[in-house]
Image (cartoon, helix red, strand yellow):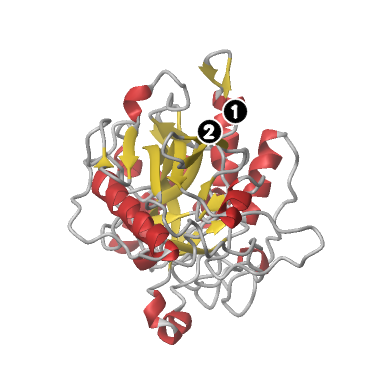
Amino acid sequence: MSDSDQLGAIAQQLTATLVEVYGGGPESGTPLVFLPGDLPVPASIVQQGQVNATKLDAWLRSGFDNPLLIRPGMAAVDSVSSRSASEIYAEVVQWAKPLAEMHTDIWERLAGEISAAQAAYGPPGGDKPIVCQPDDWPLPERTEYWTVFDSTTGTGEGQSGPYDVPPGPDSTAADTGEDAASGPPAPEVTDAPPKVDTELWQLRGEVASDQPTPASPASPAMTAVDQGVEAALENIETPAPDDSVPTDGQPAPDDAPPDTPEDYAPAVTDLTTSDSAPVSMHLEHTCVTLQRTLAGRSWWNGVFLADVGWYVPGIAKGTLVPPQPTDTNAMAPDLGLQIYAIPAALVIVRNLSVVANWSADADTALSSSTSSIGPLSLAGAQASVASDGTKAYTHAGMQVVAVLCAPLPVLPPADPPATHS
């Protein structure tokens, strides 16, 4: 097996394991996608042995509240919206109007649905929190949350699966008033795991400062997310989005997918020496669900969002969340269907270790400050040599490598009537 095939096989094995434990197959309703980029869990979230809820909320809102354009069949993210889902929801829930003749049964139903969503949301303005379950997962002593993955043996001891991952922000728990922390039962996993993007799963090191950085051959990475995390954790004010409404029904510029992919270092093609043992990988993983709750009750109403019988005055259908990009899907069917979605759960890893008889090029890449294998960061990894000559590179810190996503409907779902446009 070639070096590139080895990493691709490990990536597919890890993907199958995560889907088996947490769900997230392409047809599951909460597809799993990997995040191309280094997304460490900030150490500042834990302070004096306790989780700092304010910093955790800021990290979650800045890093995992933006709609994604994903390809479930390849477990890949194509782009990230620069506008958060919370901002989009705040706009539609505040201004939504029933698309029906006043005082008819349909109008009364829609008006009641909108009123219930507005009551759950509360007064407009201010940041609505995002919480996670379990809420103490960053604490190092909570070892029971973690499951071992070893590419040579499969999954080891740890929590049993499938994990209870709610359907995400479109859960009906938002409308019933039930305690959101309990979550609905886990979805049955009936479909096969996605086929990973092997172009993403390659070893990359650091680019020399005097060399131009080549564009990534894989999915564009989450530069906006990285910047947003740093801004929130440092309490930096980020610019308010442009709320101008286009007249042609197309997404506003600030909601458009990024034009420029993140730059990557060149992939290392020769990973191991000719007489080496295969590459192996060891890590621990866990999954935490994201919930949009305030005082234990959801402020995000999924039934309201899914209803197509309302509009927002002055905003064309699909301005905030467009329909699926049918033209792109038709032109590249082999790349899989693209859909818009929002993170519903985070897949986090720690104690990542890769072992092999590494080539000189691989050693150089793994020793660099930006070393990575696909979405798995090895930046700052510690090296150790075993008696058999194999070398292990170990990155102990926690990092988010994937999300389980909930598909988003077209927003707004309808054009304003002629008298309201």
Comparing 27 with 397, the one in front is: 397
**Does 219 sit left or right of 11 as displayed?**
right
Quadrant in the picture for the N terminus:
bottom left
Q: Secondary structure at mark 2?
A: loop
Q: Is residue 1 left or right of residue 157?
A: right
Mark 1 and mark 2 in contact? Answer it, CB < 8 Å: yes
Label 2 Cα crowd, 10 Å radius (few <14 / some 14-19 / many 20+): some
Count all numbered tags in the image, as a single digit.
Answer: 2
Asked whether residue 160 is in view, the answer is yes
Q: Position of residue 148 (x, y in %)?
A: 32, 35
Q: Looking at the image, which residue is at 50% across and 72% down?
A: 317
Q: Amino acid at mark 1?
A: Ala
> What amino acid is at disc 2?
Gly
How far apart, in angstroms, are the residues tagged by discs 1 and 2? 9 Å
Q: Residues within 10 Å of mark 1 (few under 14, many from 20)?
A: few
State the image coordinates of residue 44 (x, y, percent, origin top left).
62, 26
Q: Is residue 115 visible?
A: no
Which quarter of the figure is the C terminus placed in?
bottom right
Looking at this view, name the residue that lies furthest to the top: 48
Number of the label disc, if any, that sits on residue 397:
2
Q: Position of residue 16 (x, y in %)?
A: 28, 54
Label 1 element class = helix
Q: Nearer the viewer, residue 290 or 85?
A: 290
Relative to 74, 412 lies left or right:
right
The residue pinned by badge 1 equals 43
The residue at the point 45 percent across, 40 percent down is: 353
Q: Earlier in the sequence, mark 1 or mark 2?
A: 1
Determine which quarter of the picture holds residue 110: bottom left
Residue located farthest toward the right when viewing the structure as drawn: 210
Name the mark nearer the viewer: 1 or 2: 2
Q: Which residue is located at x 28 percent, y 48 percent?
A: 17
